[in-house]
Amino acid sequence: MNDETTHPISGYCSGERCGICRQGATHKVSEVIFDDDPQPYRHPLTRYVCCRCFKTIMGNAVPCTVEPRRWIT
């Protein structure tokens, strides 16, 4: 656990950076490839993200205690 989380962080996140904001990564998001995908044998997209970006993507149901990011458009 670190200062912005109240949940365990996988050792696989160690040394990884958020693919969105470059902060230290605390989550890994992965694409699911369904059986009817035209290219079912391709590697799924994966991305390491920090708690703020994870909460921004996934919503308020996640266990992170930080506020989601506000996107500037």
Image (cartoon, grey):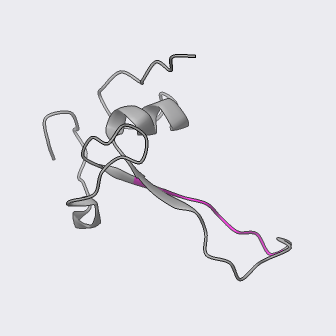
Region of the chain picked out in magenta, as a range: 28-35
The residue located at (22%, 65%) in the rendering is 11
- Look at the image and say whether residue 33 sits in the magenta stretch: yes
Residue 20: x percent and y percent? Answer: 43, 40
Q: Position of residue 19 (x, y in %)?
A: 41, 48
Magenta stretch mostly in which secondary structure? loop
Q: Quadrant of residue 51?
A: top left
- Give the residue at x 48% y 33%: 61
Question: What residue appears at the point 35 percent right and 21 percent down from the top-left corner?
Answer: 67
Residue extending farthest to the bottom is 41
Quadrant for residue 55, please give it. top left
Q: Is 56 left, or right, of 23 in this rendering?
A: right
Looking at the picture, does residue 14 appear above or below residue 56?
Answer: below
Query: Which of these two is toward me, 22 or 1?
Result: 22
Residue 39, percent from left and from top = 79, 76
Which one is in front, 63 or 29? 29
In the rendered image, which quarter contains the C terminus? top right
- Establish if 34 lies above or below 7: below
- Find the residue positioned furthest to the front: 73
Indicate whether 70 appears above or below 25: above
Q: How many marks?
A: 0
Magenta residue check for 19:
no
Left or right? Give the position of 49 relative to 32.
Answer: left
Q: x%, y% of residue 17? A: 30, 51
